[in-house]
Structures are given as C-alpha cells and as structure tokens.
C-alpha cells in the first residue's frame, strides 16, 4: 500500500504505534497503518487553522473550481478507488465502483453548491431596519466516518465543508482507513492547499476525537456511525456547544402492498437489501408484505437472492463479498439463529460457510416473529426478514414502531395511496417504488435516533456554515 501514514499539513507522518488492516475475503493483513495520538491531533488542528484562514477568504468560485477538479480526477480513477474499497471493506467490485462514483459525485455537487450560499435582504416589518442574512464558514470541522462506505461517507462531509470554507480533520474507521488516505494525493492535485484536509487514523479513537472536539477552534462535529457512539459524541459536543451533524443507525421497513408491481417490488427490495451486502444504514431490515401476495413475493425474492454469487469481491463475476469482520458476520449468524428459534422459516442461506473469509450467504426468512432480535436491531448483513400484514394502518404502525427513523420503502401501484402512506411514515427519507434513495443532490438524513442534520442537497453545506444576521439602517 502506498499511503499508510498520517496525513497532516499536506505531508505524510509516520508513527511508532501502528495497527493492521485486513482483507475480509482472505483474513490477510494488507497494510500496517499509523495511529495518531494527541500531539498529531494538535498538529492537524494548527495546520487546518492556518489553511482555513486563506481558504475561507477565497471566492466561492475559486473553491468551486478545486472541488470540480477533484470530481474530474476521481472520476478518471474510479477503478483504482473501487479496488481499494474492495480490498479493505470486502464489498464486490460492482458495489465498490458504485460507491466510488457516488463518492466522487459529492465533489461535483458541492462544487455547484459552493457558489449558491444564498442569503436574504428584507425590510423589518415594524422598525423599518433592513434585515441582512448571510452564511459564513462555521470553523474547523471534525469528521468521523464508518467502515461501510470508506470513500463516500468521507466525501459526503469533506466536499460540503470545503465548499463552505472550512478546514477539516478526518478520523476514518480503523477497519478501512486506506481509501481515505489514498484520496489525499488526488485532493492535492486538484488544488486543495496543504493543511486544509488532514487524515488521522487512530486506535485511540475515543481519546483522540474527544481531544479534537474540545479544542476551541473546532465548531462542527460531523459523524456517521452507530447510534451508541453518536450519543456519546453529542454529549461531548455539548461541552463546547459544537454544531453536530449525526448520521446514525437505521432499521428500514419495506412495505409491499397487494397492488404493487411484483417486478418493481422485487427489484427494489433486492437493491434496498443487497446494496453493500446489507451493510448499510439504509438497508431493508424489516419487510412487511401483504398476505395476498406473500407466497409469490417470497418465492421471487428467494430466487433472486439464491442467484447471487458469493466470493472474493475482487473477482468481477462475484455479486456478494464478505462482511467486514468476524464480529459482523457472527452478529448476522446470531440474528438468524434467534429468528429461527422464534419460529422463522429459512428459504435460502442461513449457514456460515466453511473456510477463510467473513462470508455469509444471501438469506431469506419468512414468518419472522415481531419480537425477533433482527426486527428490533440493524441486521447489517444479507438477510431478508419477512412478515405479513393485511391491514394498511397496522403495517404503518408496525413500520413506525422503532426508535430509528432513517429511511422506509413503499411499493404500491396506487400513487395516491402510496403518497398518503409515505406522509404517515416517521422517516427522514422514503423510497417510493424504489430501493435506492441516496443521491448527492438530495438531503440525506433521519428522524428520531437516526440522527440530526442532513448531508447532500442544499442542506449539506449549511451544516458547515453559521447564519449571520445584520440589522442595518441606511
Ligand atoms: P461505529 O462503531 O459507530 O464507528 C464509526 C466511527 O466512529 C469509526 O470511525 C469509529 O472509529 C468511531 N468511533 C468509535 N468509537 C468512538 C468514540 N468513542 N468516539 C469517537 N469516535 C468513535 O460504527 P460502524 O460500526 O463503523 O458503522 C456502522 C454504523 O454506522 C451502523 O449503525 C450504520 O447504520 C451507521 N451508518 C449510518 C449512516 C447514515 O448516514 N445514517 C451511514 C453509514 C453507516 P474506530 O473504527 O477506530 O472504532
């Protein structure tokens, strides 16, 4: 691997303490990566502060051109980034290329948004003063990303932060730091000045992030990961009243009505379930199918899931790579065992294969009990857990019966009914006759314990900006 050290102030810094990164398909070590400590965090903060002073003063157009160039360069090198993603995360090469494309698109989208930080000027109704509203860069941002999208969860934060005029320090997940490190030479080439973007992989994660978040120069903490860690960070953010952007866990319901087009429902469920082999916050977690069509739906979904080829994701013919690590694979196996104990029927999959690699086969379960663990928690694996319903209100109530509120999916041929159902779902996003909602141009984010704030869309850049109002007379 070419880039395995810390990236601070535009330079590579080795450390004595290092940690191993594994290929989940082979269980072999693929890199030994530097582990940042407090002194490294301070160096990154100093560098980011210096670089931001100049960057924030540049015109929005100048910032936009750099981001646009980053999109062009990344788009030219999608295969390179996809390969790295597969090596450290395991996902199949087509999935990895999809992620690399999605990741690059954030640079293009926020190159376009950088020049659109709209303000407002209006008359104060009573005093006659002018109300002038503008958005300014919020300050340094600490970005913490998970392992399931090693590129996209980073660019979804870096691009809007840079568009807004902020300097950043990124703490990538310890399982998958290589893709983010490899992005740094590309950003340099695109014209990102030294120090503006710093990457600190670390095995002392909690202490490092806590230190960063308590530096007075930091004003934003943007996190994607589990709800448990998100809660801790929110408590830490309270000390300095940081702007928090929290993209947390999900427990996505899929509701398939009796009037749904079956091809659309199967295709949409497959995408919502198997994109990233189920290791996604947006992954279909609970599937509610109308009892009238359940037999056909289960048969068709089982056929589609059984047809997927499992193997090392670097083989282009493979559809489903390994899960990221042994813990994740064992957790998925435990979910299936628990569901079966509580009465579920296994239609395909359900057995951990022998041999190297953290593989788990695409699995379809029906008659899943409402109190099965996989109904309450995120499965984060290739397991479709199906229940049936007969009453629309009951389906909506069951879909909403969770502390999460990231995304729901609805399949129905009756558009009026479908929209009425969408409005009653307590979720930040809904896929209507679609199994994919992620789009750089759309505000991604959840309600309830799925998080705070939005990434992408027009909202994404505002997470890194402060609103200033000037009350003026002239
Ligand atoms: P995680 O355990 O919460 O880790 C995410 C990041 O937080 C990693 O960089 C991790 O570093 C870091 N971290 C762990 N403990 C920390 C602490 N005490 N203080 C500061 N940082 C800490 O989550 P994960 O297992 O990597 O990712 C899966 C979760 O992410 C799922 O719940 C999924 O739903 C969620 N997710 C949400 C979205 C969304 O947009 N809503 C998108 C993708 C994933 P280390 O790796 O060094 O531990």
Image (cartoon, helix red, strand yellow):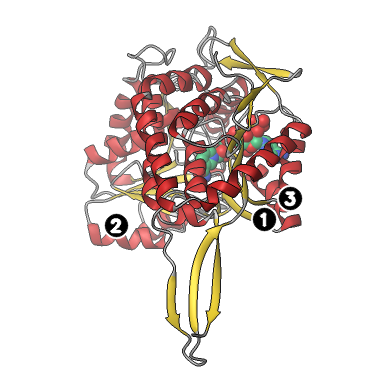
| Residue 250 visible from this viewpoint | no
Residue 231: x percent and y percent? 67, 49
Q: Residue at x 63, y 41 (%)?
A: 48
Q: Quadrant of ligand 1?
A: top right
Q: Residue at x 56, y 47 (%)?
A: 54
Please give the label number shown on residue 236. Answer: 3
Q: Quick check: is the Cβ at mark 3 less than 8 Å away from ligand 1?
A: yes
Q: Residue at x 54, y 8 (%)?
A: 356
Residue 470: x percent and y percent? 55, 75
Q: Do labels 1 and 3 touch, CB within 8 Å?
A: no
Residue holding disc 1? 242
First in sequence, mark 2 or 1: give its number.
1
Residue situated in front as seen by the camera: 425 or 406: 406
* In this view, 131 is above or below 393: below
Q: Nearer the viewer, mark 3 or mark 2?
A: 3
Please give the label number shown on residue 418. Answer: 2
Q: Nearer the viewer, mark 2 or mark 1?
A: 1
As measured in the structure, the alpha-carbon distance from the residue carrying label 3 to the one carrying label 2 is 41 Å
As measured in the structure, the alpha-carbon distance from the residue carrying label 1 to the one carrying label 3 is 9 Å
């Amino acid at each position: 691997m070419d880039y395995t050290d810390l990236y601070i102030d535009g330079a590579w810094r080795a450390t004595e303490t290092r940690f191993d990164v594994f290929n989940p398909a082979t269980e072999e070590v693929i890199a030994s990566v530097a582990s940042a400590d407090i002194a490294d965090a301070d160096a990154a903060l100093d560098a980011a502060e210096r670089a931001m002073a100049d960057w924030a003063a540049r015109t929005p157009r100048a910032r936009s051109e750099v981001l646009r160039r980053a999109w062009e360069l990344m788009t030219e090198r999608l295969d390179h980034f996809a390969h790295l993603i597969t090596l450290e995360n395991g996902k199949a090469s087509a999935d990895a290329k999809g992620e690399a494309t999605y990741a690059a698109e954030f640079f293009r989208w926020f190159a376009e948004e950088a020049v659109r930080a709209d303000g407002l000027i209006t008359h104060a109704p009573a005093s006659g003063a002018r109300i002038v509203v503008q958005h300014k860069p919020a300050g340094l941002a600490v970005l913490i990303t998970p392992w399931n999208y090693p590129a996209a969860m980073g660019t979804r934060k870096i691009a809007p932060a840079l568009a807004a005029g902020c300097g950043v320090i990124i703490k990538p997940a310890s399982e998958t730091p290589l893709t983010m490190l490899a992005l740094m030479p590309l950003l340099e080439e695109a014209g990102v000045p030294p120090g503006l973007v710093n990457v600190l992989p670390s095995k002392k994660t909690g202490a490092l992030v806590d230190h960063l978040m308590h530096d007075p120069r930091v004003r934003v903490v943007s996190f994607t990961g589990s709800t448990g860690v998100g809660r801790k960070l929110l408590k830490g953010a309270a000390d300095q009243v940081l702007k928090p952007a929290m993209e947390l866990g999900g427990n996505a319901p899929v509701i398939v009505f009796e009037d749904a087009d079956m091809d659309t429902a199967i295709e949409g469920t497959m995408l919502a379930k198997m994109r990233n082999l189920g290791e996604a916050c947006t992954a279909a977690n609970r599937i509610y199918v109308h009892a009238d069509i359940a037999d056909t739906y289960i048969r068709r979904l089982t056929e589609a899931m059984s047809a997927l080829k499992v193997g090392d994701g670097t083989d282009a013919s493979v559809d489903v790579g390994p899960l990221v690590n042994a813990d994740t694979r064992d957790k998925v196996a435990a979910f299936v065992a628990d569901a079966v104990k509580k009465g579920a029927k296994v239609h395909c999959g359900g057995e951990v294969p022998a041999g190297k690699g953290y593989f788990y086969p695409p699995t379809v379960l029906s008659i899943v009990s409402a109190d099965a663990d996989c109904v309450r928690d995120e499965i984060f694996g290739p397991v479709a857990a199906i229940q049936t319903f007969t009453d629309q209100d009951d389906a909506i109530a069951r879909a909403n019966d969770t502390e999460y509120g990231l995304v729901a999916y609805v399949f129905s041929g009756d558009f009026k009914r479908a929209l009425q159902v969408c409005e009653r779902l307590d979720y930040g996003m809904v896929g209507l006759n679609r199994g994919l909602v992620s789009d750089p141009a759309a505000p991604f984010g959840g309600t309830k314990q799925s998080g705070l704030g939005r990434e992408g869309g027009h909202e994404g850049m505002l997470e890194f900006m402060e609103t200033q109002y000037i009350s003026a007379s002239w």
